[in-house]
Image (cartoon, rainbow, N blue to C red):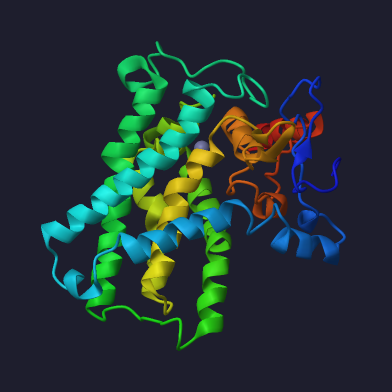
Amino acid sequence: MTRQLAHEIGKKHSATERRRPADVLEVAGVFVWPPRPGAILIWLFGSHGYLLPWNALYFAIALICWFLFTPEMSAMKDIKLGWISLILLRNLGLTIIVFGAWHLYFYILKRQKADFKFNEKQPPTNSKSFLFRHQVWDNIFWTVVSAVPIWTGYEVVMLWAYANDVIPFMSWSSHPVFFAAQLALIPFIRDIHFYVVHRLLHWRPLYRRIHKLHHHNVNPCPWSGLAMHPIEHLFYFSGVLLHWFVASHPVHILFHLQHAALSPAQGHCGFDRISISDGMSISTDNYFHYLHHKYFECNYGGDGFPAFDMLFGTFNDGTKAAKGRLEKRLTNE
Ligand SMILES: [Zn+2]
Ligand SMILES: [Zn+2]
């Protein structure tokens, strides 16, 4: 790796420094060979790594939703329009708040102008690749009309199944260690699932009919994150079915689904870093997946988690050498 440690506490920038996005993907020390034990601890518990800040943020949102915005289990025993509508509205509200906040900050208020932006162009407003010829409206359409209802559908089925003891339930008090370990592993499990499903969707017949819609976004913005064909949404959210077989709690379901639903706004924001105060910025863990949108046949894994791509030879860190390897691989296929 050309750079040693990606997930530093936050970069300081001098006032005169021109803020450019990374040209080479920074990889956390946990993914380099030979292993560096200290780097694993920093990655797990450091101020920017596996848990902090992004996964902890999505977990906090899931907890708030569980305690404040989820009906009582007894109310979810029967399939009724009332509680299902509440969950649909809650998920729609979450989507508007989270995706809307990223979009508002970067693309409406333009608080960072083009600082750290990978592609200095704005999303197209007159392109035949998109519904309404407008990338953002197209992306919002697929998110609201397909992603939110399908995400809600999975959640409703899972919650109904808990309420009726159809699937194995685990409480915090009965198995605190397994409960916490399962929560901590959910982003990792999502990465495995995403890698497998995503590679499948790049199989030519599926790509042409289904996944191509997402790849119209060669210059992604936050709303591009869930701009997918409905069949891709069915694949994409299906990882939550794991809890049908592994004893879990509804809070695991909420975290699993909300992580899948909300993290793509961050993962497609189009900016390498977000300024958090004067001269300080934090990585959006966005470059890895941005390179997937730029070069298509590489970096199939989740944001900032290159392990499977490294293992299967599809890793691209944005260097000329990686681009050469990609071209060689494609001509041999
Ligand atoms: Zn994408
Ligand atoms: Zn893809």
Q: Is residue 291 visible?
A: yes
**Foreground of the two, 35 or 21:** 21
The residue under the point 57% across, 68% down is 184
Name the side, left or right, on which 20 lies relative to 284. right
Q: Relative to 162, is 92 above or below? A: above
Q: Relative to 46, is 74 above or below? A: below
Location of residue 128 in the rendering, given as x and y in whole percent from the top left corner: 37, 14
Q: Is residue 206 visible?
A: no
* Placement of the N terminus among the 4 image quadrants: top right
Location of residue 188 in the rendering, given as x and y in whole percent from the top left corner: 58, 61
Q: Residue furthest front?
A: 278
The residue under the point 45% across, 56% down is 61
* Placement of the C terminus among the 4 image quadrants: top right
Q: Residue furthest top?
A: 126
Q: Quadrant of residue 289?
A: top right
Location of residue 238 in the rendering, given as x and y in whole percent from the top left corner: 39, 58
Q: Relative to 91, is 283 above or below? A: above
Name the side, left or right, on which 308 lies relative to 9. left
The residue under the point 40% across, 31% down is 213
Location of residue 101 in the rendering, given as x and y in whole percent from the top left corner: 46, 35
Q: Give the number of marks.
A: 0
Q: Quadrant of residue 16?
A: top right
Q: Relative to 66, is 327 above or below? A: above
Q: Quadrant of residue 52?
A: bottom right
The residue under the point 42% across, 48% down is 261
